Amino acid sequence: MSDVPISNDRALSDGWPEDLVPLRELYADEDDEEDAWSPPNHRRGSRRRRPRLAGLPLVAKGLVAVVVLTAFLALADRWAVLYAEHRAAQQLKKELKLTAAPEVEIEGFPFLTQLADRRVDELKVTVPDVAADRVTLAKVSATAKDVRITGSGLTGISGATVDAMHGEVLLSFADMNRELGASQVTFTGHGRDRVHARGTLPVAGHDVKVRADATIRRLGGRGIATEIDGMRLDLGDLATYRPGTGQSEGLHLTAKSVARITEETDKARRLLSIPALAHRAGVPDTALQQALSSDQKVSELTGSPRFVKNLMKMNLIDIAIDHPWLLKKIGLDPALLDGLTRLTRPQLADRLSLAFNLPKVPGDHGYVRLRDVTVEKDGIRVDLSGAGLSVGHG
């Protein structure tokens, strides 16, 4: 048995030896906390959260506010610009009678301050296609300065007045090739003021090669005129036709055609049997009579360089009309002659003309004038200027 006396009834009853009672006192607090247990609180928001910006310094908060306000104002300003550009584009489409609204771009920032002042510093307008007479202008671009706005507020804009404007017109060769009724003719620039026209035209069911040159010049302040010269229609490599009644115009045989006729004695004699042709070729009557009765004289006469040259210079329109077999002998369809004679010089020049006039400006105020005209690789470029233009109702 143990020699330790058990004299503390309370200690024994609690299950703690007397000499370990002090340890029991140390664990008393923890036991009390376990006895004081309460169920957990699962209610949302039971833990208070501090605002995200609560920890930021005051200066940082101010900067954040400024950035947010600036972004909001910039967004509002851009929205106002888009709205104003849309209104301006629709108004220009209506007054210029365009098929599509032009591109309008308002320069300067901020726009709201300009709107409040009722004046826009700079306005750019681009119209892809403007009809002007027979030609569609490929592109018209203009920049307007000091545009005064009429109306009240943002949505109450009723019109605008342009103090000064400058821009340019590009008359595209591609558009002209498509729209001038000569879709198989192409135009190319040649020098500062000249344009070459090359291609084919349908004549009497045949595609005839056409060659022409046009000189471009400004006509007053609103138009461009073209002078067509060097017009020539090539009937294969057999003949050429130049509209007109001059000595160098009309129907002319090529060297190949002359050689085809004169290399055979029978054909050459038949050619000399046409008195008008022999006389125009400068053949004396005595030489003509000798040639008609001698094959050797025919070959000598028609083979001489002088005869060949005179025959090529000769306008054979009237002779070919009276003797259609002449065209057959050189391999041409006589129906071509009728079609060519109907194609007069003015008609051909009109088909190749590049002239146009600017459309009338909207309203009764201001002006737009053409300035310098230059021929470039892609088309004809014209500088323009204007002032006092008004759009809408003031």
Image (tube, helix red, strand yellow):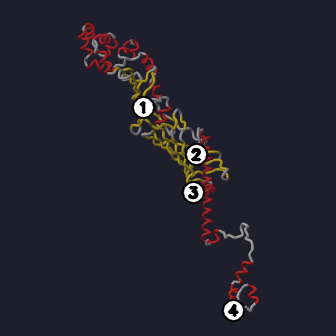
345 horizontally vs 386: left or right = left
Residue corresponding to mark 3: 109
19 horizontally vs 142: left or right = right
Dot 3 falls on a residue whose secondary structure is: loop
Q: Earlier in the sequence, mark 4 or mark 1?
A: 4
Q: Earlier in the sequence, mark 3 or mark 4?
A: 4
Q: Earlier in the sequence, mark 1 or mark 2?
A: 1
Residue corresponding to mark 4: 4
Q: What is the three-letter code of the residue carrying label 4? A: Val
Residue corresponding to mark 1: 197
- State yes or no: discs 2 and 4 in contact (Cβ < 8 Å): no
Q: What is the three-letter code of the residue carrying label 2? A: Leu
Q: Within 10 angstroms of label 1, few (less than 14), some, or many (20 or more) residues?
A: many
Whether residue 53 is situated above or below residue 277 in the rendered picture: below
Dot 1 falls on a residue whose secondary structure is: strand
- Residue 213's x, y, as percent? 41, 32
Report, in whole angstroms, how far the alpha carbon at label 1 lies from the one at label 2.
37 Å
- Residue 333's x, y, as percent? 41, 16
290 horizontally vs 176: left or right = left
Is residue 191 or residue 20 the one in the foreground? 20
Report, in whole angstroms, how far the alpha carbon at label 2 lies from the one at label 3.
24 Å
Q: Which residue appears at 76% of the width and 86% of the height?
A: 13
Q: Quadrant of residue 54?
A: bottom right
Q: What is the three-letter code of the residue carrying label 1? A: Ala
